[in-house]
Image: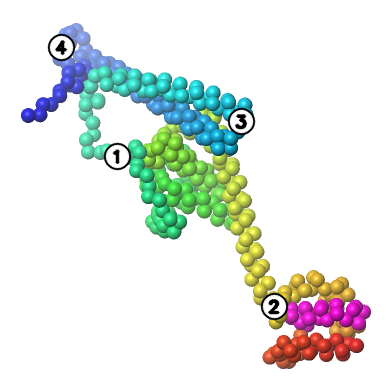
Amino acid sequence: MTTINYSKWDHIEISDDEDDTHPNIDTASLYRWKHDARLERMAQAQQKKESFEKGYLSHKQKLEEVKRKLKEADAKRELSADLEKLKIEMSDLEKQEAEWKKKEEELMKEEKLTPLNIDTICKEGMSKTLINKAPPPPKQLTDEEKADRQKIFVDKHKSEIKKYGMMQKYEDSQQYLSDNLHLVCEETANYLVLWCIDLEIEEKHDLMNHVSHQVIVMQFILELAKSLERDPRSCVRAFFSRIKIGEKQYQDAFNDELEAFKSRIRSRAKAKIDEAVKEYEEEERKKRLGPGGLDPVDVMETLPETLRECFEKQDIELLKTRILEIPKEEAEYHIKRCIDSGLWVPNPNDKNITQDDQDEEEEEFYEAVE
């Protein structure tokens, strides 16, 4: 028969419902005082725990950052004073890691030895949220599968993502993401990045700057989860707690990344605009091509000044005169290019002219001039 361990109930703090009090003491006031004192101790313990968590989180992030820098320096095989400095910093952080572990054990021991009471025994029993601390590695998707997944997610949650992107206060963003944990993912960040590019192209610079801030918030949450090897949804509160504290090093890193991101958005938007202009100009150039496949604009720009002036003035007689002023081979070359580009139409009434006919027309034109 299985036995049940009741030892955890041996030390229960029940000071506010005891009946053994002195008759001259106001029992109700005594109960309130003891209860208030216990609540204050619980609040202090909770504050101590939160302070530990924030400090340990900061330490872990510094440790990951130094590891990353050392790995990059090792890959480049750098030997410098900076590398030695990183090694020393890494050694110090590893020593601090042992101290943090010791503090964690002491904190857990204190919690275990804290007596149960009416406020800790009575808990809401039908409401809980379970988030895996270390989710299994995601399946490696192909680019096509990623694109399909992105499209499905955006089609379903586009309005929710945009609502988050328009928020201004950290408190509002934290509450909204806590209520909509499915938005804490790469797909949300990807859509917001594309939205920022579109806003910059549309010259809505202020709105682009605002949405960019929300992008970096999301990316910092995702990076925090990655460094801690945790589900991103479990890192929402940790990120906002730290950013609202206003630690200078962390705030500076956030602001630097935000400015760099906005710069990348402006560069990408400019590249897309230049690409669109180039495509438009290419389409227009194709429309201008003459019967021989040459662009009349290009041909006009390469004509000798004396001949170009004739076409600009649309003066045929002047053209005939100036053709005779240049060598025959050069004149034939320019005449052929003018015909191939449509600047010169040898026989405008004959739309079915062949290449042989065109060559004959060029020769006749030159002979007529002579």
- The tag earlier along the polypeptide, 4 or 2, is 4
Image: magenta residue range: 322-344
Q: Are marks 2 and 3 in contact (CB under 8 Å)?
A: no
Look at 41% across and 53% down and name the residue there: 141
Residue identifier under label 3: 79
- The tag earlier along the polypeptide, 4 or 3, is 4
Foreground mark, 1 or 2, reads 2
Residue identifier under label 4: 20
Bin the neighbour count of mark 4 within 10 Å (Cα to Cα): few under 14, some 14-19, many 20 and up.
few
Which quadrant of the figure has residue 50?
Answer: top left
Residue 274 showing in the rendered view: yes
Amino acid type of disc 2?
Gly
How far across and down, in percent of the image, does residue 56 sit?
42, 26
- The tag earlier along the polypeptide, 2 or 3, is 3
**Nearer to me, 230 or 32:** 230
Q: Are marks 4 and 3 in contact (CB under 8 Å)?
A: no
Residue identifier under label 1: 130
Q: Are marks 1 and 3 in contact (CB under 8 Å)?
A: no
